[in-house]
Amino acid sequence: MGGGNQNYKRCKNVSRMNSNVPSYFFSMLAASLALITRNAVSAADTRPNIVYIVADDLGWKDVGFNGAIDIKTPNLDKLAETGARFEQFYAQPMCTPTRAALLTGRYPNRYGLQTIVIPSVSTYGLATDEWLLPQALQEAGYQTAIIGKWHLGHGELKYWPKQRGFDHQYGPLIGELDYFTHEEHGVVDWYRDNKLVREKGYTTTLLGDDAVKYVNERTATTPFFLYLALNAPHTPYQAPQEYVDRYKNIEDPTRRIYAAMVTCLDDQIGRVIEALEKKKLRGNTLIFFQSDNGGTRNAMFSGVMADMSKIKIPCDNGPYREGKGTLYEGGTRVCALANWPGHIPAGITVKEMIHVVDMYPTLAKLAGASTAKCKPFDGLDVWDTISEGKTSPRTEIVYNVEPFRAAIRQGDWKLIWRTVLPSSVELYNIAQDPSEKNNVAADHPDKVADLQKRVEELARESAKPLFLIDQFKAMQKGLQGEPALPNEDAYYEKEGP
Ligand SMILES: [Ca+2]
C-alpha cells in the first residue's frame, strides 16, 4: 500500500507541474501501467527456488573446492567457482542436531535434541510445536519436497516430514541404512510419500533420480524448496563398482570406496543442475550445499552398521582437529557453498562466521515467508554477508550445550568445557590457532570465566536432552524384574560353608 500511495502522490505532483490535461492523463496512464507491470512481475514469482543440499559426514577437505586432490567433485567445484564458498560455516557435531537447527533456526539445546542423534530404536522426535522452514515456505506458496534422509523422528507419524511441511517425501527416515538393501538392522527404511517402498538401486542414485524428476515437474510460476538430504558418504562404506573402478589409483580400500561415494553424490548434484538448466529454472534458483557435520575421525561416532575395527577411517577434515561428534572445529566447521547466478558474486570466499541456524531467517526473507509462527530464532539473516560480503551479524557460535560438555565461541575466542569429573577447560584463539593445538586457558582466566558464565546462561535456558531421558527410561526397565540371586533350591542343595 505504501508504494501505491507514493505513486499516487507522485502523480499529483505531476499534475501540478503540467497544466494541460492530455499530458496529465498520459502521465497517470504511464504511472498506472508501471504499477500494473510491477505487480504482474511479482505475481509471476521472482522469488527464488531453493535447492538445499546436505551431505552426511563429509570431511571438510574431501571436496575439490577445499583442496581434495584424490577425490573428484567437479560439479561442486564449479558451483564454488561460480558462487561463494564458506570458510567458517558451522553446524552441530552430528546428524539430528544439525538438521533440527536448519529447519527450526534454533539451537538444538532449546528443544532437547542436542545430544547424539535419535537412535533407530527410539520414538521421540523434533518437538511438534516448532514451526519448521518447510511449513513457513509452504504457507508462503512454495512447493516443498524432502528427497533424502530425515532423522528428526520416525517412531510416530506426527514426526514424519510430510506432517511437518513437506508436500513430497522420498527416502529414509532414520540415520543410516544399507545403500543397496535400504535396511537398518534388517528393517527396510525407504519411503515415498509416507508409504514403504521396496526398490532396487543405490540410495544416492535413487535420490538423484527423484530430484531430477521433481525438477522436471516444476514450472516458473510456482517457486519450490527442494531439501536434497543425501545420506552419503555416511557409513557403511558402500559404492557401485563402476564408481569404485574410477579410483584404482587410491591405495587404501576404504578411502577408495569413500571417494567413489563422494563422486556419485557429486554426479547427482550435476544431474539436478542440468535438469534446472533444461527447464530454464537455473537463473532463479539458489543452490546451497553443506555437510551436516565434519567427517568421522573416531569410530565411536561412525554409526552402528559398519565394523570399523578393521578399516582405516577415510574422512579428511584438513587442518581442523578431530571430527564428527566432537566440539572441535573438525566436528563442526563444515564444507559449504552457495550459488545463485547474478545474486551471489562468482568465485568469492565468505570468511565470516555463519551457523546453520542462520539459514532459516535468511531463506525465509528471500522467499517472502512469514516467521510469525516461529519461536525466537537463534539464527540471523546473513544474506548481505553471502551476497555482498558484508560483516556477518554473527559474533557468537554455540557449538553445543549439554549437561556434561559445552563449547562456545565469541569473536576469536573458543571455550570447550567438559563438566563431568575429571573436568577440563580448553581455550583457543581460533583466528591464530584454527587447528586448536595450544590450549591457552591458563593464560586467560578472565576470558574463560566470561565464556563459562555465558555457557551457564545457555544451560539454564536449555531443555533436557531427549536422548538421555530416553536412555535412562530404557535403563530403568532393565533394572526391574527378579533379583539376580542364585535359585533358592540350587542354593540349599549346594553343599558348602
Ligand atoms: Ca551426519
Image: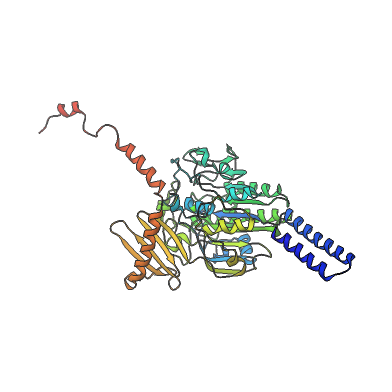
Mark count: 0
Q: Could you tell me if residue 208 is visible in this image?
A: no
- Given residues 176 and 475, the one toward you in this image is 475
Q: Where's the C terminus, which quadrant?
A: top left
- Given residues 394 and 225, the one toward you in this image is 394
Where is residue 455 drawn, in percent x and y? Answer: 38, 60
- Given residues 54 and 200, the one toward you in this image is 54
The quarter of the picture where residue 281 lies is bottom right
Q: Where's the N terminus, which quadrant?
A: bottom right
Residue at point 80%, 59% (across, down):
32
Q: Is residue 9 left or right of residue 289?
A: right
User: Colour scheme used in the picture?
Assistant: rainbow
Q: Is residue 421 above or below residue 67?
A: above
Q: Residue furthest left?
A: 497
Residue at point 58%, 67% (across, down):
385
Where is residue 31 drawn, in percent x and y? Answer: 80, 62
Residue at point 46%, 67% (across, down):
319
Q: Is residue 149 left or right of residue 217?
A: left
Q: Is residue 391 above or below residue 282?
A: below
The quarter of the picture where residue 249 lies is bottom right
Where is residue 71 drawn, in percent x and y? Answer: 56, 61
- Given residues 390 and 436, the one toward you in this image is 390
The quarter of the picture where residue 421 lies is bottom left
Q: Could you tell me if residue 38 is visible in this image?
A: yes
Q: Is residue 377 left or right of residue 469?
A: right
Where is residue 178 drawn, in percent x and y? Answer: 51, 44
